[in-house]
Structure formats: C-alpha cells, structure tokens
Amino acid sequence: MADKSELLRVPAFADLPDDQLEWFLSQSQELNYKAGDTYLRQGTPADSMFVILEGQLEVHGDMGGDSVSFSLKAGDVTGTLPYSRMTHFKVNGRSVTDSRVLRFPAALFPELVQKMPELAKRLVGLMADRIRETTRIEQQRDRLAALGKLSAGLAHELNNPASAAKRATGQLRDILKKIKNASLELGRRDLTAAQRAEIEKLETSFIQHDEPPPDPLTASDLEEQVDSLLRSHGLNDLWQLAADLAKKNIKPEALESLFAALDADTARAALVRIAASVEIANLLNEIESSTSRISDLVCAIKEYTHMDQAPVQNVDIVKSLETTLTILNHKLKRGVTVQRDYARTPFLVNSFGSELNQVWTNIIDNAVDAMGGKGELRVRTYRDDHCVVVEIGDNGPGISPEVQSHIFEPFFTTKGVGEGTGLGLDTVQRIVKKHRGNIQVTSGPGDTRFQVWLPLSEASS
C-alpha cells in the first residue's frame, strides 16, 4: 500500500503538505503490473494520470506520422494532466519490469487544482515540457520532410546535366573515331598547301558558325539542298552528314569552294572530318554547359546551407532569394513564371546561417502549391526606413479570411493528411522574430502577398 513517504520521492510531490498527500492517496488507485502487462491502450479515453512508484514503463506509438518510443521510471508522472485537451490516448504503454503505479482519475482534476495548487502548477510545467518535446519532434519531422523534398528536386536537377554530359562524352568517343579515320584518309593524299588551307579554313568557319539553329521546316529544306549538292558530285551516301550540317544552319553554297579545290574522294574525306569537328565542338559546348550547371547548383547548395561560412553574417537579401529560387527551380520550371522587382541598392541583413533561406523556401513552396504549380510568382524588395521589405506574392486563389487568422499557428494546416504538418509558417514567423523582424500577409483572389520586414545591418545604412 502506497504511503506519503513514497509519494514524496516523486519530484512533482516533493515538499507538499501531509494533508494534501493524504487526500491524493485517498483518491488514487494503486495498480500492480507484471513485466509485459499493458497499462495504456491507444484510442482509449484519456481519463487518468499515472504516478510511477516502482519499476519501469515503456510508451510507444505514432506521433505526427513518426514512430516514437520512450521509457518512464519511478518518480515520473504520465498519462493525462490538468488542463490537457487530450481526449484519447495516442500511444500504447506497457510495463517493462514489475511495477507499482498510482492511477488518479482525470475527473477529479478540478478538485485537485483547488486542494493542491502547487502540484497543479508543477503538473502544468510538466505538460509544457511535453508540448515542447512534441513540438520539437514535429519540427524535426517537418525539417526532414522539407529536406527530403529539396533533396529529391536537387537530385533531379543535378541528374539532368550529369546525364547530358555523360551522353555527350559517349558520343564524343564515336566522333573521335570518325575524325581519326578521315584524317588518316586525308594524310594518304598528296594535298597542296592551298588545298590544306581551304580545308582548315572551312573547318574553322563551320566550328565558329554561331547562327541560331533553324526551325524544323527550314532545316529540312537545307538538308535537301545540301544532300542534292553532295549527290551532284557523286557523294550519294552522305545524307546523315547533310542533316548534321543543316542543323548547324550551314548553307550549300558554303561547300562550293571545297568541291572547286578537291576531287570528289578527297572532298568526301574532308567533309567527314569537317562535320566531325563541328560535332565535337557542339558536344564540348554541351559538356561545358552541363558541368557549369552542376557547378552552379553545387554553389547554390553551399550558399543555401551557408556551408563553410560563419554562423552569423551579413547576408545579401537578393542573393539569398536568388539562391532559394535556384534550389526550387525543379518546382518552378513546371509552369511558374517568376517576376522579379529588386531594388538596385544591395540590402544586407545580419542573419543566422541559412535560416532566412528557410523563410523564403516555405513561403515560395506554399505559393507554388496554392497555384497548383502553374501561375505567376512575384518577388520584390524595397526599403522601408531602417528595414528591407521582401514581398513574395502569387496569383493563386487566395487565402480565406477565416484561414488567414490561423496560418501562423503551430500545427494549423489546410493541406491533406500527410501533406503538411502545419509547422511551416510557424517556423517562418519564429525565424523572422528571431531576426527582430515582422511578417504580414494580405490575400484576395488572384493576389496573395507575404511581406517580411527585416532590420538592415549597419553595413547597409
């Protein structure tokens, strides 16, 4: 049978008067559990508070979409607590060892608050700790979910140029064989200096030919004209070469000088080498473009995460926005047009690492979702006294007045189950306040705007 001395060993009951302890014991039921016994079932009414006197209990279940498990020991208080809004238990509980537990009915909480005000205050503190831990778990899950979405998008963005570069290098091997064979063929022929110069001149002019590619209809006409010219000189099997030159917007008259200087067989070898050189130049340009894109994305990732940078530093707001837009390009390019209206003067804000990028990511991501992935995203910066204002707007359906008043509340979300935790805009508001700033939203059909005020650093004054 539990007594006052056991209850005093529980931190929440320490130093409480004897009469209060006696009343609590008189209203409680002592329960004994064997190892493996279940003392709590998910979904049952949250009608009891439990005080663990001996042994060890374990709680496990689902919290915010994640599996959680933690242990409780002698001296801990669990179950429902005063002022809790919990109606049903969300987890299962079992006894790990033989245990003794006091069960106090939640129906007596109003009387407990009257008779044991100090205990009630301590239990409220325990509930606040529980809420903070639950919020931390939800926020961690939200960050991981956001990181997963960004990682998937970035993997796709990196894969495209990487695949293009890999494909180009594969094609380059085949083209190098062609140019080697054509060069060997030309080497066997007794070419004059003038003939060599004509081949090199034509090769250089075609490689440097930087006219935009023709439309498909024009390219088809050019291909026929070039092929007709080649056939007129007895070269009836170079249709692929004709197609390649036509795509480069090279006209048949550009080849006339070659046939004037060379016989048909030598012209064939020269044309194969020239076409191969042009193709090599094109492939090198593609590889350079692809690797530059990869490099730009890696730089954007480093900028976004503030890797290799001080934890607190002056951040250029426009650069921060552009980095975020680069990171989110996989979502934007599907149908979102970005309209930029940046002030000419650079705005610097003293920022904590990449936290501001999290603000822009959450707002932009929500805007894209609101527009269904298609619409106009407007990004604007301007100065307001000692602050920079970042305005991010969209032409989606808007946010209803009833929803607007709740969007910054923790766990509030209009998204379906599994699509949002409701912590995105709460996180945004906390980060903005941490930077001594302010955030507001105005919304109507076709025009939703989030405005973030951030104090400028001394370097911008």
Image (cartoon, rainbow, N blue to C red):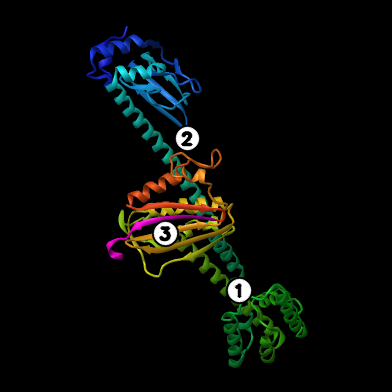
Residue 160 in which image quadrant: bottom right
Does dot 1 land on a helix, a strand or a loop?
helix
Secondary element at image label 2: loop
- Residue 390 shows which numbered tag? 3
Type of the residue with mark 2: Gly
> Which residue is tagged 1?
279
Q: Amino acid at mark 1?
A: Glu
Q: Please provide percent x and percent y for residue 409.
A: 43, 41
- What segment carries the magenta color? 447-461
Q: Count residues near mark 3 (Cα–Cα under 10 Å), then give few for <14, some for 14-19, many for 20+.
A: many
Alpha-carbon distance for marks 1 and 3?
46 Å
Q: Secondary structure at mark 3?
A: strand
- Residue at horizontal 66 percent and vertical 88 percent from the top: 258
CA gap, disc 3 to disc 2?
Answer: 32 Å
User: In the rendered view of the protein, which quadrant contains the C terminus?
Assistant: bottom left
Mark closer to the chain start, 2 or 1 = 2
Position of residue 302 measured from the top left corner of the image (x, y, whole percent): 40, 57
Residue placed furthest toward the front: 401
Instruction: Pick the residue in front: 62 or 365.
Output: 365
307 relative to 99, above or below? below
Q: Is residue 459 magenta?
A: yes
Q: CA distance from mark 2 to mark 1?
A: 55 Å
Disc number placed over residue 64 in the picture, else none: 2
